[in-house]
Image (tube, rainbow, N blue to C red):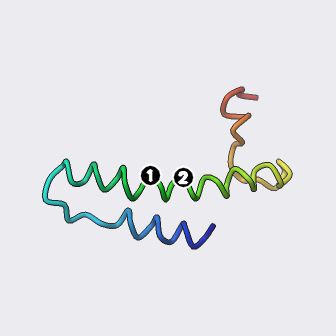
Amino acid sequence: MMDNVSKLSAAMGKHDFASLEDHMQYSAQTIRPLMDKVREYADALEGEIADDFWPLPTYQEMLFVK
């Protein structure tokens, strides 16, 4: 997971785009797939770790506020 977080962080640091269209394409083709990879790991971890130890709101908690 952390390897993909590092790649995502580096990708998000890129700011030298010729146009808004280029920036949008980069976001869609590079950043979004990396975000999806990180989310796969986070979703799996959320199901394995007890709520007491999970520092973020779970998906269930965001949908149905306690």
User: Which residue is depicted at the point 68% across and 49% down?
Assistant: 56
Q: Position of residue 27 (x, y in %)?
A: 34, 53
Query: Which residue in the structure is indicated by mark 2?
Result: 36
Q: Are marks 1 and 2 in contact (CB under 8 Å)?
A: yes
Q: Is residue 30 left or right of residue 57?
A: left
User: Which residue is depicted at the point 60% across and 70% down?
Assistant: 2
Quadrant occupied by the C terminus: top right
Q: Amino acid at mark 1?
A: Arg
Which residue occupies the extreme front position in the image?
Answer: 29
Q: Position of residue 3 (x, y in %)?
A: 57, 73
Q: Nearer the viewer, residue 66 or 30?
A: 30
Q: Is residue 66 above or below residue 54?
A: above
User: Which residue is depicted at the point 41% across and 57% down?
Assistant: 31
Query: Which residue in the structure is indicated by mark 1?
Result: 32
User: Which residue is depicted at the point 13% across and 59% down?
Assistant: 18
Tag 1 secondary structure = helix
Q: Is residue 55 left or right of residue 34?
A: right
